Image (cartoon, rainbow, N blue to C red):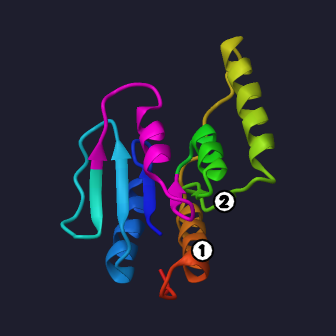
Amino acid sequence: MQIWVDADACPAVVKDILYRVADRLQLQVTLVANQLLRVPPSRFIRALQVPAGADVADQEIVRLLAPGDLVVTGDIPLASDVLNKGGYALNPRGEFYTHDNIAQMLTMRAFMDELRGSGVDTGGPAAFSQGDRQSFANSLDRHLRKHATPPAQSV
């Protein structure tokens, strides 16, 4: 198993958690982005820059991921593709996308896009909080304990 990160919009604190996990558990973490990323020197962490363009990073993640891999993303369509390919998708706030909730999330996303397209100010997501950071770390820890081989240590 390896971890893929949709890195363009991923909060820095989430990346920091993933860097520590990569080294501690000797687990490959790959950040994929349209921009050049600096990552700590580690044989377990790498950055992959893809050409600019809509969904180019998402398409590359889906192309490269293997069933059982984990993808960290806030992008609902990407999460849907990950699930369809047999991967796991976790958003930076610590919520897993599942086959049970992804259809509803896609519908809500389309509805919000339609509202914005008609001029309605829908606001943006809440600021990333310490609680979100802790929720992400806890969800990641539970997932790795269950799916990483050998059994993972605490995040």
Q: Callout 1: 10 Å neighbours few (<14), some, many (20+)?
A: some
- In terms of secondary structure, where does tag 2 sit? strand
Depth check, front residue: 90 or 117 = 90
Q: Is residue 8 above or below residue 112?
A: below
Q: Name which residue type carries label 1.
A: His
Magenta residue span: 48-72
Please state the horizontal and vertical placement of residue 5, each as a whole percent of the image: 43, 53
Question: Is 76 covered by the magenta stretch?
Answer: no
Residue at 52 percent across and 65 percent down: it is 133
Find residue 52 and report its image quarter.
top left
Residue underneath mark 2: 96
- In terms of secondary structure, where does tag 1 sit? helix
Residue at 46 percent across and 44 percent down: it is 63
Q: Are marks 2 and 1 in contact (CB under 8 Å)?
A: yes
Q: Is residue 42 above or below residue 110?
A: below
Residue 51, numbered circle: none
Q: Left or right of 140: which side holds 41?
A: left
Residue underneath mark 1: 143
Residue at 48 percent across and 87 percent down: it is 150
Q: How many marks?
A: 2
